[in-house]
Image: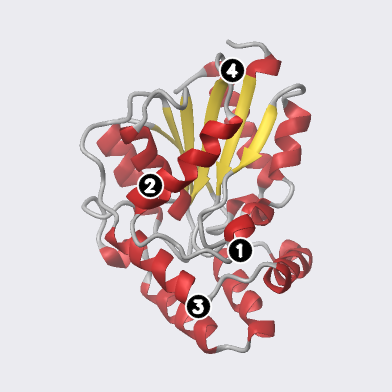
Amino acid sequence: MQPPEARHFYLIRGLIREARHWGVLPDLLRQAFPGAKVSTLDIPGAGDYFRQASPLSVDDMVNRMRADFLQRTRAGEDNTLIAISLGGMIAARWLHAHPQDFQRAVLINTSFGGLSPLYHRLRPGAALSMLHAAVTRPRQREGVILRLVSNHADVFDEGLALWESIRRERPVSAANALRQLWAATGFRLPEGRPAVPILLLASTHDRMVSVECSRAIARAWQASLSEHDSGGHDLSLDDPAWILEQVRRFLVEGPQ
C-alpha cells in the first residue's frame, strides 16, 4: 500500500447535492487516515458552481469535473474515488474514460440505465415525493427531501439545519435540478468492467433507489457489495461511520 501521505480521497455527491452534504464523512476520513488528502468535486450547477448551468449529460459532467481533478492531483498519489447516487454514474463514466486517474472506487446507492429498470432507479413513491418537493415552498423543501433519503430519525434535526443552510447560501436552481435529472435518467452502463477494484455500498431499505440496482451492478462487474440493513439513500447522513469502516477495510484488505 502507498504511505498515508500519498493517499488522496475524492468525493462526488448526487442529484442537486454539493460537497457540504457529505456532512462529517470527509473529517472522518482525515481522522482515520492521518496525512491523507480529502477533496470534494462539485457537479457543475451545485456547490462552488451553483451559478453555472449543469451539463445535460454525464459525459459532459465528467469532462468539466476532471479539469478540477487535474488541478488537484499530483504524480504518485494513490487516488480513491467515493461517489453516491448520480455521483456513482459520474464515477462509472470517469473510470471507463480515464482508468488511470483512480486506483479504486467506492460507489454508494447508485444505478445504471441499461442494467436496471426505471422503476428501480427511481422508485414510484420517491418520484411522488420529488414532485411534492418541487411544488413545496423552499423553506419546507429540504424537509421533504430529507424524509425521503434518510431512515434514521435521530439525524433529522441536525441534517435539516445543515441542508437548509446550504439551500440559503448556494441554492440549486429548478432548471439545474431538471438538467441533472435528465442526465441521470439518460445515463447508460459503459461497456466493460472498470479496470480498477470497485466496492459497492447499498442500503437494503433505500426508499429512493432500489437496492436491486447495486446488486445488478455487483453481478455485472463481479464487484464486492456491502449492504446496510437500516440506512436510507443518504448513507453519509444516516451512518457515516459505517461507510468509513467499509472504506478502511477495502483499502487494507482489498476486494472481498
The residue carrying mark 1 is 151
Q: Position of residue 193 (x, y in %)?
A: 27, 31
Q: Kindly report the distance in space between the C-alpha atoms of the residues bearing marks 1 and 2.
A: 18 Å
Which amino acid type is marked by label 4? Val
The residue carrying mark 3 is 174
Which amino acid type is marked by label 2? Ser
Question: Sequence order check: which comes first, mark 2 or mark 4?
Answer: 2
Question: Sequence order check: which comes first, mark 1 or mark 3?
Answer: 1
Within-10-Å neighbours for mark 1: few <14, some 14–19, many 20+? many
Which amino acid type is marked by label 3? Ala
Q: Residue at x 61, y 63 (%)?
A: 151
Disc 1 secondary structure class: loop
Within-10-Å neighbours for mark 4: few <14, some 14–19, many 20+? few
Disc 3 secondary structure class: helix
Question: Sequence order check: which comes first, mark 1 or mark 2?
Answer: 1
The residue carrying mark 4 is 252
